[in-house]
Image (cartoon, rainbow, N blue to C red):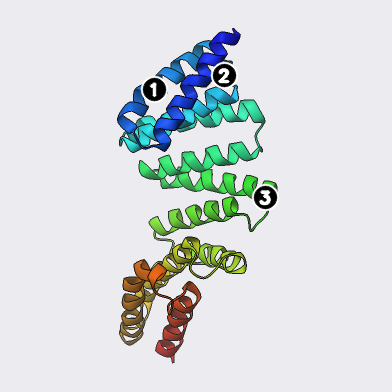
C-alpha cells in the first residue's frame, strides 16, 4: 500500500510539473494516469485525490470542454465538502472554480449562487480585505454585469476597489482591473442619461478605456486618477 501511495505521489508531481511548464499535450495523459491510480489507491476524500481532480479539471477547461469541466468541478465540490466540512476555505475555492465553469456554460444564476456562498466562506475565513475574498467579490460583480445588473456590479466593484486602494500600489494589476471594471459599469450606466450627458461622459470613458491597457507604462495615469477623471466627467455632465 505504501508503494502504491508513493507511486500516486510521483504521478501527481509529474502532472503538476507538466501543467506548470504549460506542456499541456504531455500533461493530459500524465494527469489522467495520476487520477486513475489515485482513485484505485486513495479514499474519495483524500487531499491527493482532490488535487489530482483539480489539475485534471483545469486541463479539461483549457481544452475547451466546458461541460466536462463543469461536471468535474461539481464532483470536486462534493468531495471537498465531505473531506473538510461545508465551511472550510477549500470549499470556498471549489465554489469559485464551480462558478467559473457555470459562467462558461451560460448558467449565470448558478454562478451567482456559487460565488455568493464562496464569498460568505472567504469572509469568515479571511476577512473582507483578503485577496481571495476580493477576487471572489470581483467575480460576483462580473456575473451581475453579464446579467445587465450594472448598478449592482458597480457597487461591488467599488467595494473591491476601495479595499485594494488601501493595501496595493496604484500600478498593481489588481488596481488596474478594478479601474477597468468600474469604468465598464459607468459606461453602461451612462446610457440611461440624457444625450448631452451621455456624449460628455462617453468621450471621457472612451479615452480612459483606451488608456487602461497601457497603465503599467503610464506613470501619469494610475488607477485612482482614472476613477477621479470618470467621476469629474460625470459631475460636469450632470450640471
Q: Does any portion of residue 70 appear in the rendered image?
A: no
Name the residue tied to disc 1: 30
Q: Nearer the viewer, mark 2 or mark 1?
A: 1
Along the horizontal axis of the image, is 238 left or right of 209? right
Along the horizontal axis of the image, is 114 left or right of 215? right
Name the residue tied to disc 2: 44
Q: What element does badge 3 sit on?
A: helix
Foreground pick, 147 / 225:
225
Q: Residue at x 32, y 87 (%)?
A: 196
Give neighbour class at mark 3: few <14, some 14-19, many 20+ (Cα, 10 Å): few
Name the residue tied to disc 3: 126
* Separation of residues labelled 1 and 3 (CA atoms): 34 Å
Q: What element does badge 2 sit on?
A: loop
Q: Earlier in the sequence, mark 3 or mark 2?
A: 2
Q: In this view, which residue lies farthest toward the bottom?
A: 239
Q: What element does badge 1 sit on?
A: helix
> Do residues under tags 1 and 3 come within 8 Å of each other at their CB atoms?
no
> Do residues under tags 3 and 2 come within 8 Å of each other at their CB atoms?
no
Give neighbour class at mark 1: few <14, some 14-19, many 20+ (Cα, 10 Å): many
Amino acid at each position: 500500500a505504501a508503494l502504491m501511495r508513493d507511486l500516486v505521489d510521483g504521478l501527481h508531481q509529474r502532472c503538476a510539473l507538466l501543467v506548470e511548464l504549460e506542456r499541456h499535450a504531455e500533461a493530459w495523459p500524465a494527469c489522467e494516469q495520476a487520477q486513475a491510480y489515485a482513485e484505485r489507491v486513495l479514499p474519495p476524500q483524500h487531499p491527493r485525490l482532490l488535487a489530482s481532480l483539480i489539475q485534471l479539471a483545469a486541463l479539461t477547461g483549457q481544452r475547451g470542454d466546458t461541460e466536462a469541466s463543469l461536471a468535474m468541478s461539481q464532483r470536486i465540490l462534493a468531495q471537498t465538502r465531505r473531506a473538510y466540512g461545508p465551511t472550510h476555505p477549500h470549499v470556498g475555492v471549489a465554489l469559485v472554480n464551480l462558478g467559473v465553469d457555470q459562467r462558461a456554460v451560460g448558467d449565470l444564476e448558478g454562478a451567482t449562487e456559487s460565488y455568493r456562498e464562496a464569498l460568505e466562506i472567504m469572509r469568515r475565513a479571511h476577512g473582507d480585505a483578503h485577496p481571495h475574498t476580493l477576487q471572489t467579490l470581483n467575480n460576483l460583480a462580473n456575473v451581475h454585469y453579464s446579467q445587465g445588473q450594472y448598478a449592482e456590479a458597480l457597487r461591488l466593484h467599488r467595494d473591491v476597489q476601495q479595499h485594494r486602494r488601501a493595501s496595493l500600489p496604484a500600478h498593481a494589476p489588481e488596481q488596474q482591473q478594478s479601474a477597468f471594471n468600474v469604468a465598464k459599469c459607468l459606461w453602461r450606466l451612462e446610457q440611461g442619461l440624457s444625450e448631452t450627458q451621455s456624449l460628455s461622459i462617453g468621450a471621457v470613458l472612451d479615452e480612459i478605456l483606451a488608456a487602461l491597457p497601457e497603465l503599467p507604462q503610464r506613470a501619469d495615469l494610475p488607477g485612482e486618477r482614472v476613477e477621479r477623471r470618470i467621476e469629474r466627467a460625470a459631475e460636469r455632465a450632470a450640471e
